[in-house]
Image: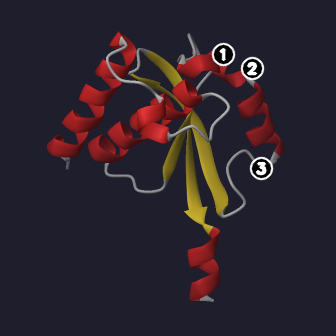
Amino acid sequence: MIDFRKYHQAHEMLINLQRGLLSAESIVGNDFDDPRRSAVSYLAGKILRARDGETNISVLLGRYGQPFLSQESAERSKSYRLLRKGEKVLTDMVEIKSFTVKFIMEIGGFAIVVKYENAQHKADAA
């Protein structure tokens, strides 16, 4: 079931970011090399979590937070190639379960959606 409140909040922030009314640094802080890319990834992930009910997903985009123009361009990206090789793309605290290229209407293009499992929770359960 869609959580419309969270969806609407994330979508409104994304629109304001794209219009230039909101700075990327106000969303993710100054600790990132490419704050716009991180902010758009964060908001796209928040939209997908609210829309699809997924909890452990992350969204990877192209440079400067731009979506990929096609599925093929996403599959040619460095992030996708690293995922396919099994190398770390996210932090060390997560274990990647699966990934796929998905069209996300709200960002106007394709993104790599990564499903992961927290390694810390897995270690605590054992």
For numbered disc 1, what is the local secondary structure?
helix
Which comes before the other along the chain, label 3 or label 2?
Answer: 2
The quadrant holding residue 35 is top right
Residue 76 image label: 2
Asked if labels 2 and 3 touch by Cβ distance under 8 angstroms, the answer is no
Q: Nearer the viewer, residue 110 or 36?
A: 36
Between circles 3 and 2, the one closer to the viewer is 3
Q: In this rendering, does residue 106 appear at all? A: no
Callout 3: 10 Å neighbours few (<14), some, many (20+)? few
At which x and y percent is residue 34?
A: 63, 27
For numbered disc 2, what is the local secondary structure?
loop
At 62% across and 56% down in the image, what residue appears?
Answer: 97
Q: Which residue is mark 1?
A: 72
At 20% across and 34% down in the image, what residue appears?
Answer: 8
Which comes before the other along the chain, label 3 or label 1?
Answer: 1
Residue 123 image label: none
Q: Which residue is mark 3?
A: 88
At which x and y percent is residue 58?
A: 53, 44
Callout 2: 10 Å neighbours few (<14), some, many (20+)? few
At which x and y percent is residue 49?
A: 35, 47
Q: In this rendering, does residue 108 appear at all? A: yes
